[in-house]
Image (cartoon, coloured by chain):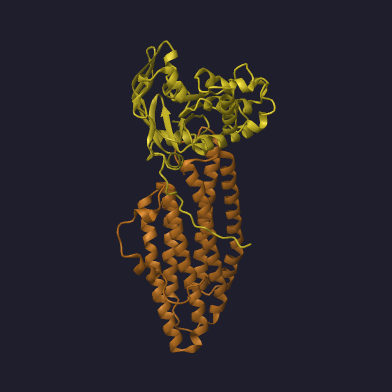
Amino acid sequence: MALSYHAQPIRAAHQTATQAAPKMSARSVDVFYGEKQALFTVDLDIPEKHVTALIGPSGCGKSTFLRCLNRMNDVVDIARVTGEITMDGGNIYDLDIVELRARVGMVFQKPNPFPKSIYDNVAYGPRIHGLAANRDELDEAVFTSLEKAGLLKEVQDRLGQPGTSLSGGQQQRLCIARAIAVNPEVILMDEPCSALDPIATARIEELIDELRESYTIVIVTHSMQQAARVSQLTAFLHLGELVEVGNTEDIFTNPRDERTQGYITGRFG
Amino acid sequence: MPESKHIVRAYDEELQQLNELIGRMGGLAETQISNAITAVVERDSELAEEVKQADARVDEMETQINALALRLLALRQPMAIDLRYILSALRIASDLERIADHAENMCRRAADLSDLPPGLAVSGIQRLGKLVLVMLKDILDASLAGDTEKVVEVWLRDEEVDELYGSLFREYLTYMMENPRNIGACTSLLFVAKNVERIGDHITNIAETVFFRIRARPLQDSLPEREPPEAAGEKRTPSAGDGDA
């Protein structure tokens, strides 16, 4: 069969991440841990249904910023957050914290399934948030979430077994299923693949790419290749400052700031 | 080469090595052009043979550059300036290899010129050759210095090459019409001139590559408004004999 060649424009006609409508916005966000300032006047728009990657050297404030988005810093006694963070235009501090955390879910570095069955891990959120009226609805929520997390096929015969009996990659996908079971709008991921092997990492990255159809995702990663692979928007932080933010393609091919260039090419900053 | 140092020293060393290889290959290509022109102008068949033999060395250098660039891409996962640097090395090596091929082709014609009728001028070829030789030297210098102004200036100089080639074409056509016995020699001279003109085109490719490496945007986007492209396009292809000789 003859091969046909379809010329395609290099840059697709769809919106770039920097043009997309913001789901969440940070304005002049400062974070202090006691006397020490961890973030300095960060302004950042998180585009809806895109993947935003936060990159930067250790201690640059990327996890701190991520934790501002669902007010995780509130649980740290000495932490103080100033500035404004909004979701769909509304201040997140005006929302009930339980509602905020349901709408802005989180997946951590190390898979942390509850010491419960696979089923109960996923059913936990819908149960406490009262999202299922009966057992059928709960089953539905659990199966859909496991399916979306790409885990259903692997675990459907052993839903009663403990979540901790799964492999690392499966546990992380279980945590993602648990996060999406409460129908969040935003999913925060703090180095979700750093404890996983390359195959499990690739599965999670593929999953992230599928999930962005329905969710807004913010991911903190130490792997620049991962940021390049999964995100559409990349923000580079350095010493608590947001140095540069742009379409991922631009950041990794032609960063504007010397510090970004130094970091992504592996040079002394 | 990108300036400040990488945290991993071996990475810098490999980039430096790539830089040296490109420099050496460029130097070799310059020698090949220079010798090829001398061989044609002075009808020196020994020198022509030397150029043909030396082409293998140019090919060998291209292979080395490809291997090193592939290694860097696979093992270092270069980003931004480094990525553009390595991609540009691959492209420049490929253009230099083609340039050397054209020099070799010129020498294949040198043998046909031994019975060149007296009075048939080769000075035009010499001028054309000198023009591209200086262009190549300048573009390699500009690349090393990261001087984009000079890169653009060299790029623009190709127009001179095309004009001179056009006038040579008309000159040899006149000789052929004057005396059919000139046809054989003039055809060979035209092929030689075409080879030199093509070298000029490869040098503009290198200029575009170097510009992109430094500025991360196409050279053509950065040019001041000039004559409409149609008019320029016509100039670039002076009637027949446009195939690769």
Q: Which chain is yellow?
A: A
Residue B85 as seen in the image, left or right of residue B108: left
Which residue is depicted at the point 66% across and 26% down?
A167
**Residue A136 sits in which quadrant?**
top right
Residue A111 can be seen, yes or no: no
Q: Is residue A144 above or below residue B133?
A: above
Q: Position of residue B210 (x, y in %)?
A: 44, 52
Q: Position of residue A106 (x, y in %)?
A: 50, 24
Residue B139 as seen in the image, left or right of residue A91: right
Q: Position of residue B115 (x, y in %)?
A: 54, 82
Closer to us: A179 or A241: A179
Residue A1 can be seen, yes or no: yes
Q: Colour of chain B?
A: orange
Q: Residue furthest right?
A: A157
- Number of marks in picture: 0
Closer to us: B11 or B236: B236
Q: Position of residue A242 (x, y in %)?
A: 38, 29
